[in-house]
Image: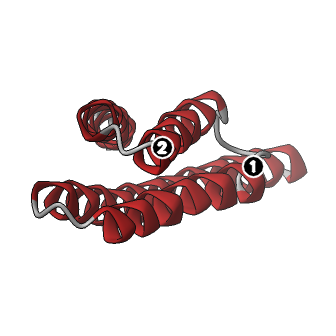
Amino acid sequence: MKRIWLCLALAAGILLLTFYSTFRVRGFADELTVQLEAAADALHADDLPAAHRAVLKGAALCEEMRRDSVLYLRTEDFLELEASLRAAASHLTENAQEEALGEIGRAAFLAESVDWLTRRWL
């Protein structure tokens, strides 16, 4: 009887961890999407400092998510997102708006695919 309760407790723990990590990733993807849209809008309005701030805020979100969730999530996706956003920030410091917009688009695609992965089975 103890083994059955132990198995049920383990299954419940796994489900709780799954739902928690899914909730965190969905919240992260929503926050990152807002930052990417703000950066793209600022670029279209030729407001480079605002775009740079939004991109750096998105990169900080990726770094925070990667550091906080290393135990229960794949971190490669967050590393790739962060690298794309840091590249966009460096393009913005060089006034290369087209390249920055391309990196922002790439980051938006990566954020969407991370969000899609959380939604495909729940």
Left or right of 115: which side holds 79?
Answer: right
Quarter of the image with the C terminus in it: top left
The amino acid at mark 2 is Leu
Residue type, mark 1 in image? Leu
Taking the spot 32% from the left edge, 35% from the top edge, the residue there is 121
The residue under the point 41% across, 48% down is 92
Q: Nearer the viewer, residue 52 or 24?
A: 52
Tell me the distance, in whole angstroms, between the alpha carbons under discs 1 and 2.
38 Å
Up/down of 65 relative to 38, above or below? above
Residue at the spot x=74%, y=59% of the render? Answer: 68
Give left or right: position of 90 versus 44.
Answer: right
- Mark 1 or mark 2, earlier in chain: 1
Outermost residue on the front side: it is 95
Q: How far across and how far down the image is residue 83, in percent?
A: 58, 34
The residue tagged 1 is 10
**Numbered disc 2: secondary structure:** helix
Q: Nearer the viewer, mark 1 or mark 2?
A: 2
- Circle 2 sits on which residue? 85
Q: 10 Å neighbourhood of mark 2: few (<14), some, or many (≥20)?
A: many
Q: Is residue 23 visible?
A: no
Residue 107 numbered tag: none
The picture quadrant where one finds residue 17 is bottom right
Find residue 76 and report its horizontal and vertical position in percent.
Answer: 63, 28
Which percent across, then down, holds residue 96? 34, 37
Foreground pick, 70 / 45: 45
Which residue is outermost to the right?
A: 2
